[in-house]
Image (cartoon, rainbow, N blue to C red):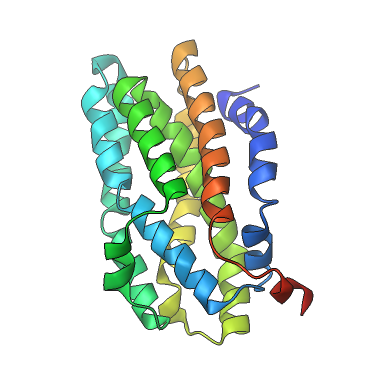
Amino acid sequence: MSFFQTLTAATAGEQRALFAVPQITDGLAGAISRETYLAYLAQAYHHVRHTVPLMRLAQGRMDRAHSHFRRALDDYIAEETGHEHWILSDIDNAGGDSEAAAAAGASPATAAMVAYAYDSVGKDNPMGLFGMIYALEGTSIALASHGASALAGALGLGPECFRYLTSHGALDQDHMVFFQGLMETVDDPADQAAIIAVARRIFVLFGELFRTIPHDRSLSHAL
């Protein structure tokens, strides 16, 4: 079994639990309100804006033996730079207030996920960052490929309200192919363990982030 297959199998339970969160299941069905969508975007902003800093932190802590992974992060950084601004535009285009969303700060659940990411990358094994990438990009692909179109139809919002979801999802599909190949080159057991541990924890924390987003489940029964 390749390491990517091992990673997928080792985190399958946590991934299933994440996709059972009502805010996600209903979102994928287009059964959430505009207010819930805006609340999701606000929290997305408050974790996505840390993506590039976390990647730079990981790069800075990787030694020469990990130069291959440092170079790979250059590509990720180039692709991820500025995505938080897409989210702010989506908020405004969907009728929200991006300045207020940014000023309000992260929810406790979002802050906990971001803090864990900084601790794992900055204090433990920086290769654990790839566990975060696996968890977040895998989730965004599902949200983009299913949720965006369902929400657009249900909420009557145009494509200008979904740039982050649709564009990020398209990019992440390419990233995941690249990621799979990259993971096949991870042969250090300590690095593999760190990636798996972080992926598991991020799946759990991401689930908590979604659970704290205000959502009226009665909307899902109205379909």
User: Is 36 situated left or right of 80 in this image?
Assistant: right
Q: Position of residue 216 (x, y in %)?
A: 65, 70
Q: Position of residue 221 (x, y in %)?
A: 78, 74
In depth, the one of 80 and 184 nearer the eye is: 80
Question: Is any part of residue 166 visible from this angle?
Answer: no
In depth, the one of 117 and 62 nearer the eye is: 117
**Quadrant (top left, top right, bottom left, bottom right) of the N terminus:** top right
Q: Position of residue 86 (x, y in %)?
A: 33, 67
In depth, the one of 52 and 217 nearer the eye is: 217
The residue sitting at 64% across, 41% down in the picture is: 15
The residue sitting at 49% across, 12% down in the picture is: 189
In depth, the one of 132 and 115 nearer the eye is: 115
The residue sitting at 38% across, 82% down in the picture is: 93
User: Is 96 situated left or right of 177 in this image?
Assistant: left
**Quadrant (top left, top right, bottom left, bottom right) of the C terminus:** bottom right
User: Is 174 situated left or right of 118 in this image?
Assistant: right
The residue sitting at 53% across, 70% down in the picture is: 36
Tell me: residue 25, above or below residue 186. below
Tell me: residue 70, above or below residue 33. above
User: Is 159 situated left or right of 92 in this image?
Assistant: right
Q: Position of residue 54 (x, y in %)?
A: 30, 38
**Quadrant location of residue 103?**
bottom left
Question: Is any part of residue 49 visible from this angle?
Answer: yes
Numbered marks: total? 0
View extreme (top): residue: 189
View extreme (left): residue: 60
